[in-house]
């Protein structure tokens, strides 16, 4: 059964790639947005097509409005948009705030915050019943960092994810009567390359602080995202779903 079109930003690797593959398995045609790593994004498309799914990969820097508009037009060719997964994000420079340079800060905010807002804006224009749409779902990929602040590592990244949490709640209430549900998943320690560059030993410390005693997988986060998008979560909106192995 066709479920319409899912856009997955940052869909070429990690959580995004796992989400794209699962969305296709659940019946969505998938538009994968990637900023770099064309080969990886094309590989996800190929895997989906081998499983008889439909997918395209579009190079999109979500922090650039022209790119977002071009990407949405490419996705429109697949059919009606019913799911947006705002997954694209960068951590920026690792270290204390007093070592942060302006260029690194602006790049994180442009990608993680402005990018999610621009994609959500265009999704609402397509999904909202107020715009003639048939409804849909937006799932933002936030982070446990939004709550704990990530001191000494990347307070700027944590702040960008806290902004995403606020957008999730506000937008959910704004479009609740227009057929759109907006939720967020807040992953904890997940086995992706986002952890490259952490100070020595820090990953072991974070693992020790996780009550479940293990690192999570991209597939587990993808399953949470697709649940929030599913009819089973039909009365769930403005929710921030923690997927942190019990870490607080």
Image: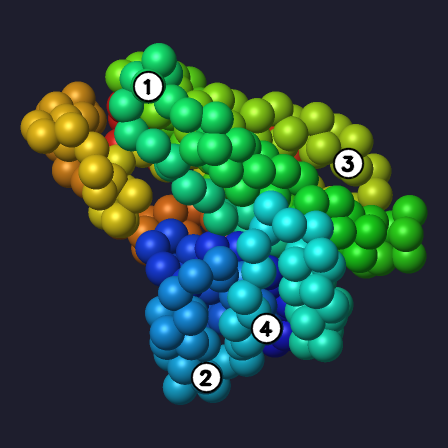
Q: Under tag 4, what secondary structure?
A: strand
The disc at residue 151 is: none
**Image location of residue 84, percent across then percent down:** 62, 53
Q: First in sequence: mark 2 or mark 4?
A: 4
The residue pinned by badge 2 equals: 49
Callouts 3 and 1 close, C-beta under 8 Å: no
User: Can residue 154 be spotted in the picture?
Assistant: yes
Neighbour class for label 1 at 10 Å: few (<14), some, many (≥20)?
Answer: few
The residue pinned by badge 3 equals: 176
For image coordinates 43% across by 33% down, the residue present is 104
Q: First in sequence: mark 2 or mark 3?
A: 2
Q: Under tag 3, what secondary structure?
A: helix
Q: CA distance from mark 1 to mark 2?
A: 45 Å
Choose mark 2 or mark 3, whichever is in front.
Answer: 2
**Image location of residue 89, percent across then percent down:** 46, 43
Q: Under tag 2, what secondary structure?
A: helix
């Amino acid at each position: 059964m066709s479920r319409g079109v899912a856009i997955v930003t940052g869909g070429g690797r990690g959580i995004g790639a796992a989400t794209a593959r699962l969305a296709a398995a659940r019946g969505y045609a998938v538009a994968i947005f990637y900023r770099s790593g064309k080969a990886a994004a094309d590989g996800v498309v190929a895997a989906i097509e081998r499983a008889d799914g439909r997918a395209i990969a579009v190079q999109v820097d979500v922090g650039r409005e022209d790119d977002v508009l071009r990407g949405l037009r490419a996705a429109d060719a697949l059919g009606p948009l019913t799911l947006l997964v705002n997954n694209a994000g960068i951590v920026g420079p690792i270290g204390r705030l007093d070592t942060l340079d302006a260029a690194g800060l602006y790049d994180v905010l442009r990608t993680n915050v402005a990018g999610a807002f621009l994609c959500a804006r265009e999704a609402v224009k397509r999904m909202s019943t107020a715009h003639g749409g048939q409804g849909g779902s937006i799932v933002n990929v936030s982070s446990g960092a939004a709550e704990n602040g990530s001191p000494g590592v990347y307070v700027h990244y944590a702040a960008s994810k806290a902004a995403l949490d606020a957008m999730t709640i506000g937008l959910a209430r704004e479009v609740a009567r227009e057929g759109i549900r907006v939720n967020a998943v807040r992953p904890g320690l997940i086995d992706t390359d986002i952890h490259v560059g952490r100070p020595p030993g820090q990953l072991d410390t974070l693992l020790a602080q996780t009550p479940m005693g293990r690192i999570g997988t991209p597939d587990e986060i993808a399953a949470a995202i697709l649940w929030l998008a599913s009819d089973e979560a039909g009365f769930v909106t403005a929710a921030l779903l923690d997927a942190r192995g019990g870490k607080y």
